[in-house]
Image (cartoon, grey):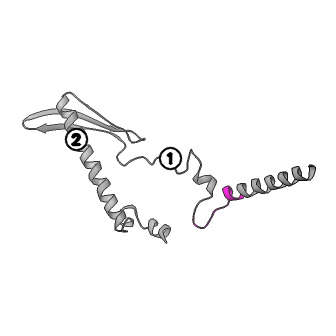
Amino acid sequence: MAKFIYVKLGLSVVGLVLVIVLVSVPISVMAPLGQVLNPGTGVWVNVPPPGVGCYSGVLTVNGGSAAIVVCVTPDGFVRIASNETWAVFYEQGYLTAEYRLAQMYFMAMMTMGNLSSIVGPSVRILAH
């Protein structure tokens, strides 16, 4: 019985050492697994969208005009404020269409295998 406990302990220590090595040693061109899986800096961290900040302007449609402020937060939320309700809805529809077109273009480039034309040549290195 005591021999069985020592075998289990030995296997546990070997498994623990293997996990520590996998988490701390880079594999091929990838970063060490510990850096990739880190919730603070790894794959779960959202990259801020382009255009983070607040932008203001005047929206004129069919002879009516309204002041409008659009704020994009670092976590990707879009906030729209205006002195007219129709201007908020108009801007929300415009931004939805703009982001949807960007998503469709991105997906088209990805399916054609030409994603590096959007995000840069660094993707070509990782794809090989």
Q: Residue furthest bottom?
A: 128
Residue 25 as seen in the image, left or right of residue 38: right
Residue 27 coordinates in the image, percent (x, y): 62, 64
| Mark 2–mark 1 distance (CA, rounded to whole Å) | 28 Å
Residue 52 coordinates in the image, percent (x, y): 37, 43
Start and end of the magenta stretch? 21-29
Q: Earlier in the sequence, mark 2 or mark 1?
A: 1
Compared to 2, does 86 lie above or below? above
Instruction: Give whichever of 83, 91 is nearer the camera.
Output: 91
Q: Can residue 25 be found in the magenta stretch?
A: yes
For the point 11% across and 38% down, the residue is: 61
Instruction: Please tell me how crowded label 1 is: few (under 14), some (14-19), or many (20+) other residues with Cα within 10 Å.
Output: few
Residue 59 as seen in the image, left or right of residue 20: left
Residue 57 coordinates in the image, percent (x, y): 22, 38
Q: Within the image, what quadrant is residue 17 found in?
A: bottom right
Q: Residue furthest right?
A: 2
Compared to 6, does 55 lie above or below? above
> Disc 1 marks which amino acid?
Val
Instruction: Please tell me how crowded label 2 is: few (under 14), some (14-19), or many (20+) other residues with Cα within 10 Å.
Output: few
**What residue is disc 1 on?**
45
Q: Within the image, what quadrant is residue 106 found in?
A: bottom left
Q: Secondary structure at mark 2?
A: helix
Which of the labelled discs sits on residue 36, or is there none?
none
Q: Secondary structure at mark 1?
A: loop
Residue 116 coordinates in the image, percent (x, y): 39, 66
Q: Residue furthest front?
A: 1
For the point 31% across and 62% down, the residue is: 108
For the point 38% across and 47% down, the residue is: 49
Which of the labelled discs sits on residue 93, or is there none?
2
Residue 105 as seen in the image, left or right of residue 49: left
Instruction: Give whichever of 64, 43 is nearer the camera.
Output: 43
